[in-house]
Amino acid sequence: MKSITLDINSALSTVSRADIAALEPKATEALDKVISATGAGNDFLGWVNLPTETTEALLDDIIACADHLRATCDTVVAIGIGGSYLGAKAVIEALSDSFAPYRPAIQGEPKVIFAGQNIGEDYLYELQDYLKDKRFGIIVISKSGTTTEPAIAFRLLKEQLERQLGVDEARSRIVAITDEKRGALRTLATSEGYKTFVIADNVGGRFSVLTPVGLLPIAVAGFDIRALIDGAAEMEKATAEPSESNLAYLYACTRNALYRAGKKIEILVNYNPKLHYFAEWWKQLYGESEGKDHKGIFPAAVDFSTDLHSMGQWIQDGERTIFETVITVLEQQHEKLIPSDEANLDGLNYIAGKHVDEVNKMAELGTRIAHVDGGVPNLLISLPALREKYLGQLIYFFEKACGISGYMLDVNPFNQPGVEDYKRNMFALLAKPGYEEATAAIRARLD
Ligand code: PA5
């Protein structure tokens, strides 16, 4: 059975195997808290057994809904922010043709585009302009059902869809994914009679990609959600026990040993542009889970070799507080050989006949060696290929490691109290009803 792997050898110049082993008791305790739901935030552990407990009936329902949207729409707008969009975006980008956005929209193979992840007036204007001659549908996703960014986007697009298609046809092309009972979106979906899916109470946004939140947009984009769940289920089983062969446990131990050795920043590195959004998903997962109580490894990300020409200098030679986790993709989907050229003015004939990926892999190896030599320890995750099954494994691996690692840091990995602060100020500044005192207080500060 092919699977993702983790190699920590290039971190051992900074932390020894003994340093890592010294954290095993803490990691074992942390894994136990995740499995037996005995730690802080234990009411948000619904994601732990999600892959093996996902029913065929749910997958059938999601696929049927996706088929309906695929048959009726040339474009589907997934509206959501944070954990309600990053997972789907990450998987769709990883599996899609890089130039899909520039190809014409066709019914049967709809484009999935995203909104509600910002409050950009130009973005929303241009989105609505793009959609004015499209047969579009909407998947609106909000666990709380009250988040401002997706609510604004949904209000605009719902009105546009009703105007373009009529209220009844619009209703048949809107799907809401939200809490079973609470929130404004649930109330609206019930009163309009939209097709809905539930986000379980015990699954937090950033751990929700393997629920309908991620699965529906991924299925609409035409990808195999059963294989994604199967891969995650394999990883769920492989990460249940505390041992070095449990990759999530090993990763959590190693990154915490590096953190204790002064490596405060982890850079997730890819050598495949299709993984750019996977890193965005990972940043949210780790940033929101671990950055608490003035603790936590700062999650950063780069796309190489692109960013070797921008961030490469800092990584090679800047402050030595970083380590890298590289995701390498072993097998490519397509073949492209470098052609020979008689004039050879660019001097590239020495690599003529080679696969482009061979050059990429040498850039990767050369960079890893240079960075380790420069004092940047390196963890290496190998993905057999960019396919649903391995992405499912990778997603679950990072989720499980995140739960373990958060508990090792003695924080509650499943809340996000810090995210509320900006919202309070924004509502006060916008004079939202109920915020009168906060409005007066913040205005007084600005006078
Ligand atoms: O991880 C989280 O919980 C957050 O990032 C949420 O996903 C994000 O704030 C969106 O929230 P909601 O789905 O309630 O609109």
Image (cartoon, rainbow, N blue to C red):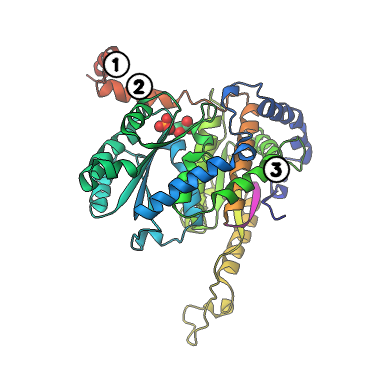
Residue under label 2, please give it. Answer: 424
Task: Tell me the SS state at disc 1.
Answer: loop
Please report the residue visible at 44 percent of the width from the left and 37 percent of the height from the top. Answer: 84
Mark 2 neighbour class, 10 Å CA radius: few under 14, some 14 to 19, many 20 or more: some
* Residue 354 in which image quadrant: bottom right
Mark with earlier residue (3, 2): 3
Q: Residue furthest top?
A: 437
Q: Is residue 408 above or below residue 369?
A: above
Ligand 1 near label 3 (Cβ, under 8 Å)? no
Callout 2, which amino acid? Answer: Arg
Q: Are marks 1 and 2 in contact (CB under 8 Å)?
A: yes
Q: Nearer the viewer, residue 224 or 367?
A: 224
Per the rendered image, the range of residues in magenta is 377-386
Task: Tell me the SS state at disc 2.
Answer: helix
Callout 1, which amino acid? Answer: Tyr
Mark 3 neighbour class, 10 Å CA radius: few under 14, some 14 to 19, many 20 or more: many
